[in-house]
Amino acid sequence: MLLENDDSVNRRELLRELVRQARFILSLPLTQAVISLSEPSETTATALRSKGDKMNDNELLGSNDPYRLPRHVIPTRYDIRLEPDLAAATFSGHVTITLMVKQETQTILLNATDLRIESTGLEGTTGRKIEATVELEPLLQRVRLSCRQPVTPGEWRLHLSFHGRLNDQLRGFYRSTYKDASGMVQTLAATQFEATDARRAFPCWDEPDFKAVFATTLVIDPQFTAISNTSVVSESVEESKKVMRFADTIKMSTYLVAFVVGRMQPTKPVFVGRTPLRIWTVPEKQELTPFGQEIAVASLKFFEEYYGITYPGDKLDLVAIPDFASGAMENFGAITFRETALLVDPRAGTHAELGRVADVVAHENAHMWFGDLVTMSWWNGLWLNEAFATFMEMLAVDAWKPEWKRWETFSVARAAAFSVDGLMSTRPIEYEVQAPKDADAMFDVLTYEKGASVLRMLEQYIGPTVFRDGVRRYLRTHAYGNADTKDLWTAIGAVAQQPVPELMNGWIFHPGFPLVTAEMDGQTLKLSQQRFTYLKQEIQPEQLWHIPVQIRLTKDGRTEERQLLLTERDATVPIPSDVTAVLVNAGGHGFYRAHHRGSLLQQLLDQSRDHLAPIERFNLVSDAWATTLAGVMPLDEYLALTARFKGEQDKNVWAVLLDSFSFLNRIIAPNDRASLEALVRDRVGQAVKNLGWDPQPGESDLIRQLRGDLLGALGRKGNDQATQQQAVEWYRQYRKDPSAVDPNIVPALVTILAYVGDETRYEEFSELYRTASTPQEERRYLFSLAMFRSPELIARTLTRTINGEIRTQDAPFIVAAAMTNVYVREQAWEFVKTNWDQMDRLFPKQGLRRMCGGIVGLATPELEKDVHHFFTARKIDFGGKTMDQYLEQLRVAVSFREREGRMMPATLASAIQS
Ligand code: BES
Ligand code: ZN
């Protein structure tokens, strides 16, 4: 549960008490500890409290975490029959679970929630039957079966019938709707089980290491079709219903099971080896499939080759769902997507939009092996799934379109990880998980982006071939099973013949990352490491990492690289006297920030054009900005540095620069804003002039994307009137003939027009949002509705986030966007406070969490105080450290404001002169 009410504290206390009792009981001899079953209890709090004295042999065999199931009854197979009623938004089902009972027991615990479970019985292989009664334990989301007689070791079949609702929460078995070509509302049913929501669709052992075979049958209305993890083995009609039976799956985790039922349409299959690969959409959207199918096919081939293992399923379907909480989900053989992440028109999409589809498709395909074939044992090891899929996504997209230079853009992701990992409230990549909401909180930049960054660092350190062979060994060893971080190190270490755990454990099991300070002392380069934090606080004990430091020396225009493993706090490197520049973190793969002190930075800046790769320039600016936020580099020095990049042509380097200007925009006082706009015009103006508005023949996609990014910045953050006028003109042309304008600048036109727009424009964009012909266009106009400056117009947008007009998959992001729109952020925050309960009910849980990320935009001391008050008074907890991180990010911004705010106009004015 996401939003905790008042008695949640008591509840948490109770849980703790329960754990304590369990520990106590565990320390007793078995005979004393076995306490007989007491009568079923209804109320949640007492149900919890009574756990202590209901402790029985089942619990004793499991862990002492009340959320974990005991492990002496193991499911091996599920035969599931489900009958959804789309019109009534309900479903009924029956599941037969084949069990291996390892130790005699009379109690069986499994997961289920929001289900009504009706009848039950156990059946032995010899035909012996045992009746069992069902008791729900809602707080722990589980079911307790009390068997009439002892269930002896061996194989048993458990029969359960159940009923549930197709919910609107975009999790479990849920309902999604869309308007068809004639404007009729159509319904479909889909699933989203990760992390812990399979238990909402059928009773099951819903933990990733209870792998089993699933055989699904869907009973549906004849006008619909159904998709599940495997191919259809039979289709028949029973009592005017269509009965679709699917083949057995591989042995896999419950969170990877999927069903989709509705009027879905497939593309023709493309075969990758023997695997047919299809894209499914609602009937109107088939035209938007070729691009997604192309990267799906290319990445599937790439992964078969890289992993050295053919795709382990019998088919692969990629399904676009109109309502979808996250970006996509790697259900084995039946990957589900939100529409923007799969369907795109390559002629109308921007580079970034096409790139998004390629990324997500490659990422999910990578999971078919990493995550699906081999799965982390428990959610604390989620990075083994997500960091790897993210890393593999880069490799596959890079191989597919090398001209996109995917690893260069990965810098932006690494920087996003740094920005959370520089907080005192960060967490290690691998982090304890108990409650479902703690599992949800693991899906963050630390798991994904930090995880992928440290994998990249390792790959570059031991070499790509050795790394790949280690990965192959890991997958082969653990196929159809589960694994932990140490298993990965064992496999890679065996191939690399290096002590991988020593190198890597600091990055995985400790929070934060190092700042490597580099300074010349005569002919000696002095290096030292220290944890990087934005807010200065004592860190005890001192933390050291094993850092592969790549150093590049430049002399006479020639370069030379040195590598050292920095394991102590300090190290020295002798530097030949003719060296003119020294770069720390050459190649830019290290997961650390570098602070080049004194002359070192100056030399790099003087030579940056010639000797720094784009990733290195990115890091130079990004590290400089981070050290500025941390109070290590003075703001005027950073702003002077940005002046060196007016001629920059790399979109990622520009992304950091623009991001730092946006940050300043959030903390600057309204009266001082004009001085920031002048700085933005000064820095961006020249670059825009160099590029011009018209795409040049032979120009790369990256440059086209950059043009769009810069125009948008100049028109909004620079408040540049000439650009705004041009944008009006170009937009008019675009509306007459979309092909007259490069798609990459269309988002800039739309956002600038929203920024300067009035009610007429607002209504125009609202209408275009409703009638858009691609998911990207729909999204673009939708987000523009949060970018107007008029409070009256923003009020309309906000209302539409909770009145059903905007899909709940998008609404939280619109609210977040409004909270980072400096002209209306207070209003957006008031709206959140006023409508919190409704949002908590309506929005998908992860959406609500992401929405609250928008509070980092509320960077004034007064708003910060109010934010604290609200979240504390309401005891809002998203699991893990999410809330602490949001609040600390806000603190970083506000403390910067307190430090620099008053001087800002002067600092900015002198930065323009420089
Ligand atoms: N396994 C996730 C989907 C997911 C996310 C499930 C959060 C439960 C909670 C999937 O593989 C994923 O990572 N999706 C990303 C897109 C990806 C390209 C980074 C997403 O949904 O944002
Ligand atoms: Zn993933």
Image: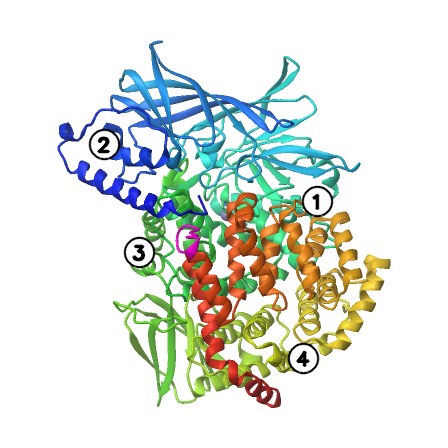
Q: Identify the amino acid type marked 4.
A: Arg
Q: Are marks 3 and 1 in contact (CB under 8 Å)?
A: no
Q: Which mark is residue 681?
A: 4
In this rendering, the answer to whether 723 lies above or below 825 is below
- With 110 as the anchor, is 244 left or right in this view? right
Q: Identify the amino acid type marked 1.
A: Pro
Camera-side residue: 22 or 543?
22
Q: Mark 3 or mark 1: which comes first in sequence?
A: 1
Badge 2 density bin: few <14, some 14–19, many ≥20, Cα 10 Å = some
Q: Identify the amino acid type marked 3.
A: Pro
Count the marks: how many? 4
* Residue 344 highlighted magenta (yes or no): no
Q: Mark 4 or mark 1: which comes first in sequence?
A: 1
Q: Position of residue 182 (x, y in %)?
A: 80, 36
Could you say whether the residue bearing mark 3 is in a helix, strand or loop?
helix
Residue 285 seen: yes
Q: Mark 2 or mark 4: which comes first in sequence?
A: 2
> Magenta segment, which residues?
873-881
Identify the coloring: rainbow
Q: Which residue is mark 2?
A: 53
CA distance for labels 1 and 2: 60 Å
Residue 557 seen: no
Q: Mark 2 or mark 3: which comes first in sequence?
A: 2
Could you say whether the residue bearing mark 4 is in a helix, strand or loop?
helix
Q: Nearer the viewer, mark 1 or mark 2?
A: 2
CA distance for labels 2 and 3: 42 Å
Could you say whether the residue bearing mark 2 is in a helix, strand or loop?
helix
